[in-house]
């Protein structure tokens, strides 16, 4: 069945087609949700919300790009919305205090394996985690992040810098522990 | 320089997670499915509500146009119809029974209308199954929308009677939605047999009496419409799945117009507007389970109280327009109906298909003051059976 046909069937409310779309894209989306969520339960909530949106707003899919990319975007937006609505996301805009962090090396992060990096990202505070994911992994600009999370561009930059610093600190601490153990 | 480095970092880890995947728990899909079902159902309810509201508006407009036409016909002195339309044996009867009986004295060669009842009490007992009435009721309702209720009835008595009644009510507290078709069969006695149990012969139903005595070319028309905005509180599944309680409050307003023309010599025009307040309470209980079917019993009580808020009567007597009289009257009505039903239902997912049949007993009491002169008390007892086939959906 072609992707177009699948989309058409989903638009007609065909449950089998919806299940096929879910089966094909939910593993990818779940990994996105896990990066944004603090735990498995939150990730599942976000995933559920994402797919409800996918099926109820499929009319908005313009079919110019692949369906997977559109679903991915819906999932990321759902995750961002999830934390924006929770209001417990702590986003500070005071960039000057943490100015020294800007420009921290990202080499250490690039050298990590995916699983290791994933684990460290999940340990970040919510605000850092969301911004870091959106900027460093999804490739959103700070301006776009600001719009989605309804914060200023400066706040997004600040969160990102602090997220990087926190990750770097985790790596250094880990290295120290290994050194001591050796 | 700084900006360049930032741009480089934008999405710099994307490749690392390109192949990342994690199979979610099956309960996530179940949640998605359940949510989609709910949205679909809500959408359907909105559609049904809109449809019912649309039909109500159309029917209301239709009746309004009919009444306007009737008024125009009367003003133009153009009543030519030879059909006899009267309203009988329904909630509107109280309204017509308070009309002072008129007597048509044809022997003197000069038509006069005289009120022969100065004070009376009438008790009518209709229990013999000597005639049948078929009534179709379409009832559509939703949790926050309108209840659309339309009754058609056809009665063969001394003359043909057609009854069209529209009812619209809001059900703000209703849990669930209901759609079904109602088939009533109704029994009552023929006209003028048991109707004077302890009354005076002349006190029989004024409208019928008049029609019966009228000359062949007499024309009589009656138009009525009613509106029933109201609130029904259904306490049901929240209490116990096996007991369903229904409490309702309603407000009904209707207007009627009657025109009669006896040849070209005399005519009568009456306009009435009336309000009815309804309270109802019902209990339904599942009794026995037979496989996937439930046998249930239902008891319901309904009380209506009303008063006329406008009542005018204009009489043209004889060919000379000297005896034109205009009078107004005040009337009050009480209707108590109790019903005992039994039926069988089957639940399929969220839908319950049911058929129920039973008996109703209706006591209709009214008092009327025709101007300051003639207080009239009227009482009517009626027993009838009804069968109901329907579907109830719950959210």
Image (tube, coloured by chain):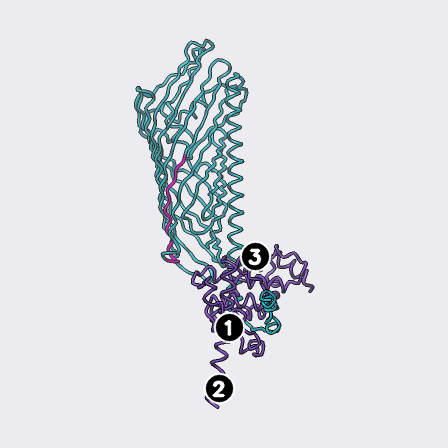
Foreground residue, B38 or B137?
Answer: B38
Location of the N terminus of chain B by quadrant is bottom right
Chain letter of mark 3 equals A
Instruction: Determine if marks 2 and 1 fall on one subunit.
Output: yes
As measured in the structure, the alpha-carbon distance from the residue carrying label 2 to the one carrying label 1 is 20 Å
Residue, x 45% and y 49% (percent of image)? B143
As measured in the structure, the alpha-carbon distance from the residue carrying label 1 to the one carrying label 3 is 31 Å
Foreground residue, B332 or B386?
Answer: B332
- In the picture shown, does residue B181 fall above or below B157? below
Q: Quadrant of residue B106?
A: top left
Q: Nearer the viewer, mark 2 or mark 1?
A: 2
Disc 1, SS: helix
Question: Is the residue marked by circle 3 packed among few (<14), some (14-19), or many (20+) residues within 10 Å?
Answer: some
As measured in the structure, the alpha-carbon distance from the residue carrying label 3 to the one carrying label 2 is 50 Å
Foreground residue, A140 or A11?
Answer: A140
Chain letter of mark 2 equals A
Secondary structure mainly formed by the magenta segment: strand
Mark 2 sits on what residue? A178
Instruction: Determine if marks 1 and 3 fall on one subunit.
Output: yes
- Which portion, as a residue range, is magenta? B240-252
Asked if disc 2 and disc 1 are in contact, CB closer than 8 Å, the reply is no
- Sooner in the amino-acid sequence: mark 2 or mark 1: 1
Q: Give the colour chain A carries in the figure.
A: purple
Q: Is residue B155 rendered to the left or right of residue A1? A: left
Instruction: Residue B369: give x, y in percent of width and height.
Output: 32, 24
Q: Give the colour chain B carries in the figure.
A: cyan
Mark 1 sits on what residue? A121
- In the picture shown, does residue A107 fall above or below B166? below
Q: Is residue B329 visible?
A: yes
Disc 3, SS: helix
Mark 3 sits on what residue? A56
């Amino acid at each position: 069945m072609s992707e177009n046909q699948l989309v058409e069937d989903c638009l007609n409310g065909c449950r089998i087609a919806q299940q096929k779309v879910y089966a094909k894209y939910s593993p990818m989306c779940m990994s996105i949700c896990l990066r944004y969520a603090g735990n498995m339960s939150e990730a599942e909530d976000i995933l559920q919300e994402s797919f409800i949106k996918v099926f109820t707003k499929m009319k908005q899919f313009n079919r110019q790009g692949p369906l997977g990319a559109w679903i991915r975007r819906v999932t990321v937006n759902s995750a961002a919305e999830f934390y924006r609505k929770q209001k417990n996301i702590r986003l500070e805009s005071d960039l000057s205090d943490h100015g020294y962090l800007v420009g921290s090396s990202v080499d250490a992060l690039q050298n990590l394996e995916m699983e290791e990096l994933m684990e460290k990202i999940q340990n970040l505070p919510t605000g850092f985690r969301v911004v870091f994911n959106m900027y460093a992994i999804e490739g959103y600009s700070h301006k776009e992040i600001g719009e989605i999370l309804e914060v200023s561009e400066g706040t997004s930059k600040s969160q990102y810098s602090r997220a990087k610093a926190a990750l770097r600190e985790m790596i250094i601490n880990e290295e120290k522990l290994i050194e001591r153990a050796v | 320089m700084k900006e360049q480095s930032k741009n480089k970092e934008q999405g710099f880890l994307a490749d690392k997670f390109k192949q990342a995947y994690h199979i979610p728990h099956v309960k996530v899909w179940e949640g998605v499915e359940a949510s989609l079902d709910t949205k679909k159902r809500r959408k359907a309810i909105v559609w049904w509500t809109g449809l019912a509201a649309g039909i109500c508006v159309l029917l209301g407009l239709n009746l309004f146009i009919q009444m306007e036409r009737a008024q125009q016909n009367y003003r133009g002195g153009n009543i030519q119809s030879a059909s006899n339309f009267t309203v009988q044996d329904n909630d509107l009867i109280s309204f017509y029974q308070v009309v002072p009986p008129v007597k048509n004295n044809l022997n003197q060669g000069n038509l006069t209308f005289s009120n022969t009842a100065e004070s009376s009490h009438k008790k009518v007992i209709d229990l013999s199954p000597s005639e049948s009435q078929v009534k179709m009721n379409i009832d559509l309702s939703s949790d926050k929308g309108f209840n659309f209720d339309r009754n058609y009835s056809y009665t063969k008595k001394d003359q043909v009677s057609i009854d069209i009644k529209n009812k619209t009510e809001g059900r703000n507290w209703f849990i669930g939605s209901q759609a079904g078709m109602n088939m009533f069969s109704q029994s009552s006695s023929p006209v003028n047999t048991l109707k004077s149990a302890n009354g005076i012969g002349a006190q029989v139903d004024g409208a019928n009496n008049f029609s019966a005595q009228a000359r062949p070319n007499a024309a009589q028309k009656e138009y009525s419409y009613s509106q029933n905005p109201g609130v029904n509180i259904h306490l049901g599944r929240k209490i116990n799945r096996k007991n369903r309680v229904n409490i309702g409050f309603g407000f009904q307003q209707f207007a009627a117009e009657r025109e009669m023309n006896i040849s070209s010599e005399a005519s009568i025009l009456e306009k009435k507007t009336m309000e009815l307040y309804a309270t109802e309470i019902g209990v339904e209980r599942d009794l026995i389970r037979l496989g996937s079917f439930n046998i249930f019993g239902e008891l319901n009580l309904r009380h209506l109280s009303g008063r006329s808020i406008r009542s005018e009567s204009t009489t043209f007597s004889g060919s000379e327009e000297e005896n034109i009289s205009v009078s107004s009257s005040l009337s009050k009505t009480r209707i108590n109906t109790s019903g005992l039903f039994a039926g069988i239902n089957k639940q399929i997912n969220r839908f319950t298909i049911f058929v129920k049949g039973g008996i109703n007993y209706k006591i209709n009491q009214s008092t009327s003051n025709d101007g300051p002169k003639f207080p009239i008390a009227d009482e009517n007892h009626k027993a009838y059976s009804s069968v109901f086939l329907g579907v109830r959906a719950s959210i």
